[in-house]
Amino acid sequence: MKKTNQSSIQAKMFNFAVFELVRNQRNSFEPIWTVDSWVKLLIWLSLNCGLSGEKESLQSFADALGSTLTIRMRKIFFERTLEDLSLYLIADPSEAKVFVMPVASEISLTYDRCKEALNIVGLTARVITDSSQWEEHDQLIAIPWNSSESGC
């Protein structure tokens, strides 16, 4: 097997393992859907890589991850696909709004389905649930965070 092919397989395996780890652990750090939960995940990963919990060590860990990997991990951390509802949800507290969209274009996007999705993932208490304050775009509903929840 060629060296480049081996490297490609190793890179794919690394990505798969890291992203599965994030998916499997993202609900373990309370309160979920917060910057605090994201930071707790990074600290947990750092400690499990043999680093100390000191600021300098954590900074070294963050530097070693690099921005590309960190951005991809954060994306997975704050997004969910709800297969039963055929909805995709993005709820990064650094954004002003939570975004809900259908997985497929033929799926109808309704306020009731969005409310059900928010309830399933535990976001109901963190967002404005009055749908009159939601923004409806073509195949996307933007839901504002409660004022205390956004802004990382």
Image: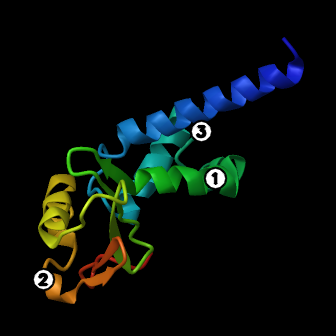
**Would you name the residue on which mark 3 appears?**
51
**Would you name the residue on which mark 1 appears?**
62
Left or right of residue 46: residue 110? left
Q: CA distance from mark 1 to mark 3?
A: 11 Å
The secondary structure type at the circle numbered 1 is helix
Location of residue 124 with respect to 120 vertically, above or below: below
Location of residue 148 with respect to 92 vertically, above or below: below
**Would you name the residue on which mark 2 appears?**
130
**Of the pair 111 and 92, the residue shown nearer to us:** 111
Q: Quick check: can you spot residue 129?
A: yes
Residue 20 x/y as whole percent: 46, 34
Quadrant into which the C terminus falls: bottom left
> For the residue marked with disc 2, what is the amino acid?
Asp
> For the residue marked with disc 1, what is the amino acid?
Ala
Instruction: Give the mark nearer the N terminus: 1 vs 3.
Output: 3
Instruction: Give the mark nearer the N terminus: 2 vs 3.
Output: 3
Residue drawn at point x = 11 percent, y = 67 percent:
112
